[in-house]
Amino acid sequence: MSDYNELMGFVRETEALSQVAGRLGWDQETVMPGGAVEQRAEEHGAMASVLHARRIDPRIGGWLETAVAEDDVAAAQIRHIRRSFERAAKVPAQLASAIARETSRAHRIWAQARADEDVAAFLPALDKVLQLKREEAQAIAGRADTYDAMLDDYEPGATAAQLSAMFGAMRPRLVALRGAIRDKAPAPMLRGTFPEGEQMALTRDLALAFGYDLNNGRIDKALHPFSSGSGLDVRITTRTNVDDPFNCFYSTIHEVGHACYEQNIDRDYLLTPLGAGVSMGVHESQSRIYENQIGRSRAFTGWLFGQMKDRFGDFGIASADDFFACVNRVADGFVRTEADEVQYNLHVLLRFDLEQALVSGDLLVRDLEAAWNDRFASDFGFAVDKPSHGVLQDVHWSEGLFGYFPTYSLGNVYAGCLHTALRADVPDLDDDLARGDTSRATGWLSDKVQRHGGLYAPRDVIARASGGAPSEGPLLDYLEAKFGAIYGL
């Protein structure tokens, strides 16, 4: 057996164990009894120790020295393995285990604090997680930027300076568009109640319409919708609100975008470094283009309007055009995951700036709520009414995911580039979407992006698919055209 094959055999076992660890997280979010939190924290810590030991196994270094890449796929596998090995080797095993234990505990504390609207109950746990994640990033970064080391976990090659420049270019046009819309009459709203059972039935149909394979997946409910797994076992969650079915439907379409990315990766890459999405920015590009450019398009919402009328009867919307405006309604709100396309990125930019300040030490955890509330009032023009609409609304910091938030906006930028290319390649796409048929759109994304998994670097994936270097221009042009038409700007 060649050194390359020995290396890949070892890595496949590690990837399989990593999938098992991920299933522990899925279970914790969906069906785990509340009293199991302390035991689950220990289980997470034990799995993290095992995985960390495998990822820094000295044999990997030896194999990397002698393994021969006979093609581009093998070269990409080796590139990913070397990057993971070198990063993991800088992190002490005790620290990796401590992070897994503390984030598991902090997640449960966050969930209870959010339910109780009690920020103070969560802050000590957050402070502990932040200290551990800062220690980890400093070990990886050495003399380089600590926050960049965190960001590199989710978007390899990106830096805070690059993203700050991109986001700085986005902000003025987003704020101007929002201001112009605020001067117009509001879009119509749904009326009535929408039973959970009917929502979940339509949710399943939507998942299937966007290509989600339920033979290798499942749909469950969770406090914070997410997608989990890769390859042959890719699961999603959603949530319901009897007064707002769009929360359920579009959360589902969003998570299906993530899930289809994982399900459509070349099966030859199963349980290897290439067998998962290459970055969170690229991952988010799939969820956002499924949810927004396809799912909230005039053509697709026309089909959804008919589906909802058949299932729910009269809900106060008279026409497909009014329904399109309703789905894309721009309105003041507190919650990032429920924000319209115009304001969504402003929510992300708030978090990006705050977490950089936390990591650098310029902002102390005890001052985070006040800083959040001040920044929110400045950015959105009204005050946060309760912690679950403010600093406690997101799960990410409880799980130690510092550096993750900016990939949401980067994913929107990537989606804008992909959508422009998709429309150029499939100019009559709306004919399909009006029938609820997304297959040409999702097939294009599968071929251009998803099947490659981690074969190419993140920016290269988007550049190859869209025909040019990623930039914020296509996203902003799309938003101005779409919402200009809806609001008569």
Image: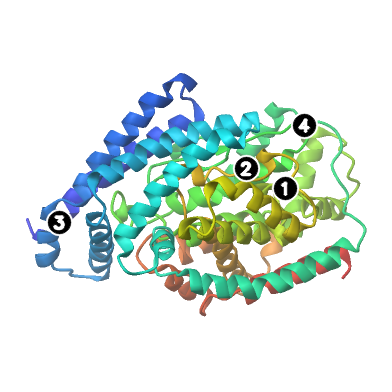
Look at the numbered disc 3 and give the secondary structure of its residue. Answer: helix
- Please report the residue visible at 55 percent of the width from the left and 67 percent of the height from the top: 414
Q: Earlier in the sequence, mark 4 or mark 1?
A: 4
Q: Position of residue 342 (x, y in %)?
A: 73, 61
- Please report the residue visible at 61 percent of the width from the left and 74 percent of the height from the top: 472
Q: Position of residue 309 (x, y in %)?
A: 82, 39
Q: Is residue 485 left or right of residue 213?
A: right
Q: Nearer the viewer, residue 358 or 392?
A: 358
Kindly report the distance in space between the C-alpha atoms of the residues bearing marks 2 and 4.
Answer: 24 Å
- Amino acid type indicated by mark 1: Phe
Q: Earlier in the sequence, mark 2 or mark 4?
A: 4
Q: Is residue 100 visible?
A: yes
| Callouts 4 and 1 close, C-beta under 8 Å | no
Q: Earlier in the sequence, mark 2 or mark 1?
A: 1
Residue count near mark 1 (Cα–Cα under 10 Å), binned few <14, some 14–19, many ≥20: many
Q: Nearer the viewer, residue 107 or 429?
A: 107
The residue under label 4 is 194
The N terminus, quarter of image: bottom left
| Callouts 2 and 1 close, C-beta under 8 Å | yes
- Amino acid type indicated by mark 2: Gln
The residue under label 2 is 393
Kindly report the distance in space between the C-alpha atoms of the residues bearing marks 4 and 1.
Answer: 22 Å
Q: Is residue 436 visible?
A: no
Q: Which mark is residue 334?
A: 1
Kindly report the distance in space between the C-alpha atoms of the residues bearing marks 2 and 1.
Answer: 9 Å
Q: Position of residue 391 (x, y in %)?
A: 62, 45
Kindly report the distance in space between the C-alpha atoms of the residues bearing marks 1 and 3.
Answer: 47 Å
The residue under label 3 is 60
Look at the numbered disc 1 and give the secondary structure of its residue. Answer: loop
| Callouts 3 and 4 close, C-beta under 8 Å | no
| Front position among marks 1 and 3 | 1
